[in-house]
Image (cartoon, helix red, strand yellow):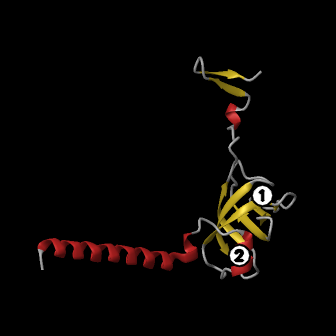
Amino acid sequence: MKAKHQRLILALVALAALIGAGLLAASALKDEAAYFYAPADVRAKGVEPGKAIRLGGMVVKHSLKRAADGITIRFDVTDGKATVPATFSGITPDLFREGSGVVAEGAFDGKGTFVATNLLAKHDERYMPRELEGIQYDEKSHQLKAAP
């Protein structure tokens, strides 16, 4: 067999091995590649208690309740199709509020409540830090100025 044919066969075998490895990795990850679970996914598929996941959705309005200890909160997370009760003990992010997006890291307890260990508050594209509210950027002069 000529050297040219040997190189071609070797290249084809290497390509097949790469494709096979990629398919094997993709099948192993399946649903685990998701950034977070939505409440509807949790209700449909079920998540075993104690398994660390991320739960994402919107904080239901009028569901945020503070406990007497001052650091524990209870709230509901929804994606419009299902709602999941959640708790968190600690200092909440400044952007965490009812009606806003949240990604909570934690696990479900045996009663179906999500116990969050970390909260990641999401904001929209109109986000403005509190320190800069009422200030605009003038592109011509490249300076900050008070909004009219």
Q: For the residue labelled by badge 1, is the local secondary structure a helix, a strand or a loop?
A: loop
Q: Determine which quarter of the picture holds residue 25.
A: bottom left
Q: Is residue 116 above or below residue 61?
A: below
Residue hosting label 2: 42
* In this view, 8 is above or below 144: below
Horizontal side of 2 relative to 12 (left or right) equals: left
Q: Position of residue 122 (x, y in %)?
A: 68, 52
**Which dot, 2 or 1, sits closer to the camera?**
2
- Residue 75 percent location from the top left of the image: 79, 63
User: Mark 2 falls on what kind of element?
Assistant: helix
Q: Position of residue 137 (x, y in %)?
A: 64, 25
Q: Which mark is residue 9?
A: none
| Residue for point 65% across, 82% down | 48
Tell me the kind of residue under disc 2.
Val
Q: Residue at horizontal 61%, vertical 78%? A: 51
Which amino acid type is shown beneath numbered disc 1?
A: Gly
The residue sitting at the left extreme is: 2
* Residue depicted at 75% across the width and 74% down the height: 113
Which residue, as the protein is rendered here, is positioned at the far top?
A: 141
The residue wearing badge 1 is: 70
Query: Does 92 sit above or below residue 32?
Result: above
Tell me the residue at 80%/69% (across/down): 81
How would you rate the neighbour count of disc 1 (Cα within 10 Å): few for under 14, some for 14-19, many for 20 or more?
few
Q: Pick whichever of labels 2 and 1 is earlier in the sequence.
A: 2
From mark 2 to mark 1, how far is it between C-alphas?
A: 29 Å
The quarter of the picture where the N terminus appears is bottom left
Residue 114 placement (x, y as % from top left): 72, 72
Q: Nearer the viewer, residue 121 or 1?
A: 1
In-front residue for pair 20/61: 20
Rendering quarter of residue 143:
top right
Q: Is residue 139 left or right of residue 61?
A: left
The quarter in which the C terminus is drawn is top right
